[in-house]
Image (spheres, coloured by chain):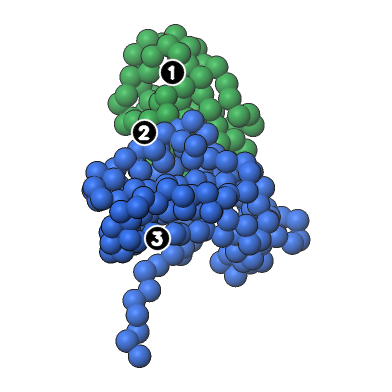
Chain colours: A green, B blue
């Protein structure tokens, strides 16, 4: 299956892109994908815990199972207002 | 529409008031010329557009469920803003002022907590960084001194 991974703000700087398609094994959970990103980018590994995550524009938990076509984003600390 | 790249028309938001509303509470967030003691030249707001819209709509529905006589309108700027420009506007209207004040205050607090919008500060020396509110003092509730 394939998901679309979006990066914003400081995470976009770390990843070096705004968006990427990712092929993942069936059953991959939100927390699993975060662990994969940590292994790829030392600056993500510096985060003590998984940041807030969203799938298809809604906040989700780490155990949310990803499905083909999902839009996934891990969110750095928000600073609106 | 909750996110805009254009200057916010505060007057248009005030048209949300109904004939039964006796209290209209407005909050404007404005770009300030310093943060944490460092001067600010300008601000860039980046939004996760579709999710920010969905989250602000959810907050408005939640507030109107908690204060059934209140209606809340809110809009947040994206893109580059100069000092003094309005970054966020909230209008809470209600038959009486207490509910309007309470819902307006709750609206800005919730926007700052969950809406996926990020702020990059540009300084006069050319440096810039993404603001992380979890690492700064931010807004504290200041109690009246009673003097």
As helix, strand or loop, the secondary structure at mark 2 comes to strand
- At x 40%, y 44%, the residue is B114
Q: Which of marks 3 and 1 is in front?
A: 3
Are the residues tagged 3 and 1 within 8 Å (C-beta)? no
Q: Is residue A48 visible?
A: no
The residue tagged 2 is A59
Q: Tell which subunit mark 2 falls on.
A: A
Q: How crowded is mark 1: few (under 14 residues within 10 Å), some or many (20 or more)?
A: some
Q: Tell which subunit mark 3 falls on.
A: B
Q: Is residue B125 left or right of residue B132?
A: right
- Mark-to-mark CA distance, 2 and 3: 29 Å
Up the image or down, B126 lies above or below B1; here it is below
The residue tagged 1 is A70
Residue B130 versus residue B17: which sits nearer the camera?
B17
Q: In which quarter of the image is residue B55?
A: top left
Q: In the rendering, at what x and y percent does residue A3 appear?
A: 47, 16
Task: Kindly identify which numbered label has been placed on residue B25.
Answer: 3
Q: In the rendering, at what x and y percent does residue B5 appear?
A: 62, 41
As helix, strand or loop, the secondary structure at mark 3 comes to strand
Up the image or down, B49 lies above or below B123; here it is above
Up the image or down, A5 lies above or below B36; here it is above
- At x 66%, y 61%, the residue is B83
Question: Considering only order in the chain, which callout, 2 or 1, is on the residue closer to the N terminus?
Answer: 2
- Mark-to-mark CA distance, 1 and 2: 13 Å
């Amino acid at each position: 299956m394939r998901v679309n991974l979006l990066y914003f703000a400081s995470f976009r700087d770390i990843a070096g892109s705004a968006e990427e398609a990712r092929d993942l094994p069936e059953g991959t959970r939100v927390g699993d994908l975060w662990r994969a990103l940590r292994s790829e980018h030392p600056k993500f590994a510096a985060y003590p815990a998984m940041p807030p995550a969203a799938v298809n524009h809604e906040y989700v938990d780490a155990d949310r199972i990803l499905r083909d076509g999902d839009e996934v984003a891990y969110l750095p600390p928000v600073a609106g207002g | 529409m909750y996110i805009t790249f254009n200057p916010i028309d505060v007057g248009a938001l005030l048209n949300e008031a109904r004939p039964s509303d006796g209290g209209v509470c407005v909050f404007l967030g404005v770009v300030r010329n310093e943060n944490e003691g460092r001067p600010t030249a300008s601000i860039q707001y980046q939004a996760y557009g579709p999710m920010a819209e969905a989250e602000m709509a959810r907050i408005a529905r939640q507030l109107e469920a908690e204060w059934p006589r209140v209606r809340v309108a809110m809009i947040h700027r994206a893109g580059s803003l100069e000092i003094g420009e309005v970054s966020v506007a909230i209008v809470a209207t209600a038959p009486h002022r207490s509910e309007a004040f309470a819902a307006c205050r709750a609206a800005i607090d919730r926007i700052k907590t969950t809406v996926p919008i990020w702020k990059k500060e540009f300084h006069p020396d050319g440096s810039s960084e993404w603001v992380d509110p979890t690492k700064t003092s931010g807004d504290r509730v200041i109690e009246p001194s009673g003097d």
